[in-house]
Each structure stands twice: as structure tokens, then as C-alpha cells.
Image: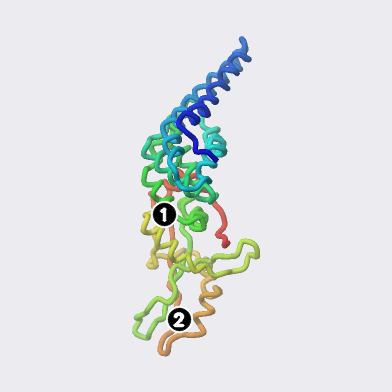
Amino acid sequence: MAEMSPEDGVKTAGAIVNVVADLVKVAGDDPQVKEAARNLGQTAVTVTAAINNFLLPIAVVNYSFTKARTYFETRFSKDIEKRIAVIPPEDVIEPKASIAGPALQGLAFSHEEPALRDMYLSLIAAAMDKRVASRAHPAFVEIIKQLTAIEARQLVQFVSQQQMHPIVEYRYTVADGGHRIARTHVMDARNEQTGERAEMPELPVFVDNWTRLGLIMVAYDLRMTDELAYEFATQRPEYLELTKSVPEGCTLTVAKGVIQPTQFGLEFGRAVGTSEIKMELN
């Protein structure tokens, strides 16, 4: 596929405005159709400006593979249009370069991963909504870049609302109270297809990464008020496996804690359009 030139991109973007012109011709004196055309025109001009300013400079870069260029040429406009369709025309603005530029660059390399693609697109759309644009922080782009696709899907449930979730740590404890960690950051992950408990070895790394990024906090000196929330702890496959090889002189204990979003994490969740989903395994 030939590389899209700036001229080709301008023609593509200009087609949006031509549609508006055609609507005005058809409208005649119908005030409702004229109003619809005016609103669509306002949105079209803004979207066209955004494409010219941010999309074209990225589209002409040779990424050494054609998939990114194909995505921008054939699908990007439709994807972003779906997200800005809910924004009132008068509130559609050109996104800040500090958001749109890096987000489009990240999108070029992750458009085949639905979870990451959706986050980038939602963030760009938020930056184009005058009502919430100030909450679309430039740091959010860098956060998405530091997530894997599976990780992004797991993160959703923790930054979708202000809520605590149970989390445990398995420890080998000696008589004097000292201990060493046997397994940390364990939650009740289940296989989405079967509903059975299943290990998720990468989850502790995910949790540490989210903590490092400032999205969540984990504390083992706090706990849920409902003790039943921790009923899963001694039924997990990780716990059952650890019971088979407890070091001499030690007992296997469970440290109960909580995982919850930070304010920064909640703002990130709002900006990238997260919604509640069940923890799932690939």
C-alpha cells in the first residue's frame, strides 16, 4: 500500500466538509435541516483541523510496517467519530497537541489491541470535549504506553469507581512473628469461560506497575470490614500449592489487605472511558 501523502490526507479530511456543503444544498429552506447541517459543519471543521494538525504528520512517518498506515487511512476516522458523536457540536474542540500527538503515536503501535486502542481513542475524544478536556492529563498517554493489553483489561475494574477490593499476601511466619513473603498481591481471579479459580502469575507485576504509575494503592495494614470478602484466600490454588511445602518451623499465614484507586487513578479511568468488567484470564 502506498504511503499517504499530506496532500492525500488533506483531500480525505476535506471530504468531510464537502458532505456538509451537500447537506446545505439539499436543505433548501428547511430550518431543521439547516440547523443540523450547521452543527455538523461546526464539528466537521474541528475534526478536519485536528486531522490536519495531528493525524497527517504521523501518517506520513514510515513506521516500517503498513498496518499502522492502513489503520489511519481506513478505520481511524470511523473509530474517533463514534466517540465524539455523543459530544454536543458546540463543545467539540481541537485537542491539545500534548494529548493528540503522543496518543496517535501510541495508537499507531497498539491499534490491534482492543483494550489499548479503546483507551487511546477515548482519551483523544475526552481532549476534544470542551466540558472535560481539562481533565485529560498528558501523563495519561504515557500511562497507557506502559500497560500491556491484558493488563489494561484487568486495570479497568480498579479505576472505574471509588471502591476497595480485597487482596491478600501469603507469608511463611515463624513463632516470634517474623515472616517472609511466599506470594504477594493475590486476588480471586477466575477463568472467564469456566468460572473456576485460576492462577494469574502476572497479576503481582501488574499491581506493582499500577502502584508505580500512581493509579492504585495497596495496603496490608487495612482490611475490608466484611471478613467474608477474604473467604477465597484459603481456597485459592496458590494457597493450596504452598501448603505442600511449608518450611520447617514456619506456618503459612494470610495477610489481608485492600487495593483501591487513587484520585489520579480515578481521573485516568474517567479520561480513558473505563467501565466495570469482571476479572478475566486469556
Count the numbered circles shown: 2
Image height of 50 relative to 42, above or below: below
Q: Amino acid at mark 2?
A: Leu
**Residue 256 quadrant:** bottom left
Q: Earlier in the sequence, mark 2 or mark 1?
A: 1
Q: Residue at x 41, y 81 (%)?
A: 172
Q: Are marks 2 and 1 in contact (CB under 8 Å)?
A: no
Task: Name the residue beneath numbered marker 1.
Answer: 146
Task: Name the residue beneath numbered marker 2.
Answer: 252
Q: Amino acid at mark 1?
A: Gln
Question: Where residue 37 sits: x, y (%)?
Answer: 56, 19
Q: Nearer the viewer, residue 197 or 43?
A: 43
* Mark 1 secondary-structure assignment: loop
Question: Where residue 135 sits: x, y (%)?
Answer: 39, 40
Image height of 276 relative to 38, above or below: below
Q: Nearer the viewer, residue 135 or 173?
A: 135
Q: Residue furthest front?
A: 2
Q: Quadrant of the C terminus?
A: bottom right
Question: Where residue 109 sits: x, y (%)?
Answer: 47, 49
Q: Nearer the viewer, residue 106 or 59?
A: 59
Q: Is residue 132 visible?
A: no
